[in-house]
Image (cartoon, helix red, strand yellow):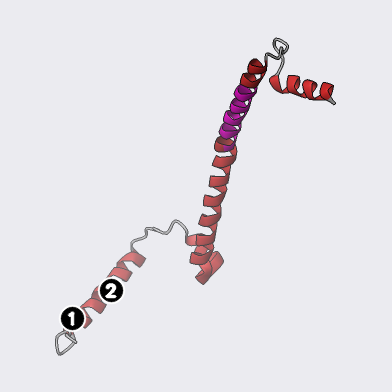
């Protein structure tokens, strides 16, 4: 194993000194760069796990909201249009009259009731 340190350990001492200097500068700068410092005081060593769980829950909730508010209504509308188009073609092909301004689904239900 190749050592990157001098025999007297001067490189290690220099790195320790630089690390101590960086910590002293951070502590004495007067600037709080921690946006989630309150989580340290509330959760302590569990902060990373709690934040991971919260981010996962927020992501899952956002995906459900997008699907519930956008995707599902769009798919529902397209399905209804597809069904109504298919029913219109069947009714026209069979030459079945239906009321003007009425719904195809209502007319189909009336036709089924009259058959039974």
Q: In which quarter of the image is the N terminus?
A: bottom left
Q: What secondary structure predominates along the stretch shown in magenta? A: helix
Please determine whether, in this image, residue 81 is positioned above or below residue 71: above
Q: Does the magenta stretch include residue 61?
A: no
In the current view of this chain or complex, which residue is farthest to the front? 94
Element under label 2? Answer: helix
Q: Mark 2 points at which residue?
A: 19
Tell me which corner region of the image, top left, top right, bottom left or bottom right, holds residue 25: bottom left
Q: Along the polypeptide, which appears first: circle 2 or circle 1?
A: 1
Q: Which residue is drawn at 48% across and 65% down?
A: 48
Q: In which quarter of the image is residue 74?
A: top right
- Cα distance in 3D space between marks 2 and 1: 12 Å
Left or right relative to 113: residue 59? left
Badge 1 local density, few (<14 within 10 Å), some, or many (20+)?
Answer: few
Q: Nearer the viewer, residue 54 or 98?
A: 98
| Residue 11 coordinates in the image, percent (x, y) | 18, 81
Q: Report the span colored magenta.
A: 72-87
Nearest to the observer: residue 96 or residue 43: 96
Q: Given contact means CB atoms under 8 Å apart, are the residues at marks 2 and 1 in contact?
A: no
Callout 1: helix, strand or loop?
helix
Q: In which quarter of the image is residue 83?
A: top right
Residue at 73% x, 11% y: name it.
Answer: 99
* Image coordinates for residue 102, horizontal then vertical, percent: 72, 15
Q: Is residue 32 above or below residue 69?
A: below
Quadrant location of the C terminus in the rendered image: top right
Q: Is 69 or 43 nearer to us in this picture?
A: 69
Rendered residue at 78%/21% (across/down):
111
């Amino acid at each position: 194993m190749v050592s990157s340190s001098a025999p007297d350990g001067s490189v290690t001492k220099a790195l320790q000194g630089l690390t101590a200097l960086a910590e002293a500068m951070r502590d004495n700068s007067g600037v709080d760069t921690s946006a989630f410092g309150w989580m340290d005081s509330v959760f302590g060593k569990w902060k990373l796990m709690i934040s991971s769980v919260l981010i996962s829950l927020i992501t899952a909730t956002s995906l459900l909201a997008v699907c519930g508010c956008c995707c599902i209504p769009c798919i529902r509308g397209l399905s209804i249009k597809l069904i109504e188009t298919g029913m219109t073609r069947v009714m026209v092909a069979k030459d079945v009259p239906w009321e003007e301004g009425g719904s195809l689904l209502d007319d189909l239900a009336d036709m089924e009731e009259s058959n039974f």
